[in-house]
Image: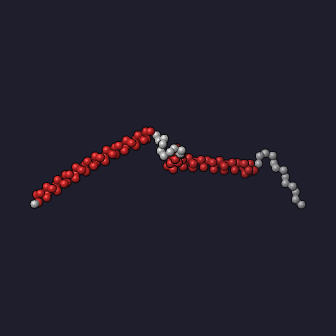
Amino acid sequence: MQTPLPPAPPGVDWNSLFGDLLAPTLAFVVVIVVGASMIRWLLRSPVGEALAERIRRRGRPDGAGDEPGRVAVLEEQVAQLTAHVSELGERLDFTERVLAERRERKLGAGQ
């Protein structure tokens, strides 16, 4: 015949407390901290910057609302590049004229 279990000793049952309450709570906190750390890392990476830029541009029609300073900087860069290409074209024309004159002199001296 079996006898009933003796009553639990007075005080806190630490095994029960840890197993029932603290372990799941601790696991939940660890998952939240690790997840938040991963999200923070992702948002600070180039991928996060691209996502942020996409969110900022959402609802704007094709570039409308760009910062005026950025547009002005880009226009200045285009103007500088245009001037540079023009100068290179002039230099190329000069070089072609000099080479043509040399050829003419060589042909005239060879006859």
The percent coordinates of residue 32 (x first, y second) are: 63, 48
Q: Residue 64's x, y, as percent?
A: 48, 42
Report if residue 108 is visible in the image: yes
From the viewer's side, name the closer residue of 81 and 31: 81
Q: Residue furthest front?
A: 61
Instruction: Work out whether residue 46 or residue 2 is closer to the camera in this orientation and state it.
Output: 46
Snapshot colouring: secondary structure
Comparing 36 with 17, the one in front is 36
**Residue displayed at 65% across by 47% down:** 29
Q: How many marks?
A: 0
Q: Position of residue 110 (x, y in %)?
A: 11, 60
The image position of residue 53, as x and y in percent, is: 51, 46
> Could you tell me which quadrant the N terminus lies in?
bottom right
**Above or below 69: residue 39:** below
Looking at the image, the residue that sits furthest to the top is 69
User: Which of the two residues, 44 or 82, is positioned nearer the viewer here?
Assistant: 82
The C terminus lies in quadrant: bottom left
Q: Is residue 79 left or right of residue 63?
A: left
Can residue 48 be seen by looking at this rendering?
no
Answer with left or right where residue 34 lies relative to residue 50. Answer: right
At x 34% / y 46%, what residue is drawn? 81
Residue drawn at x 63%, y 50% is 31
- Point 19% across, 52% down: residue: 98
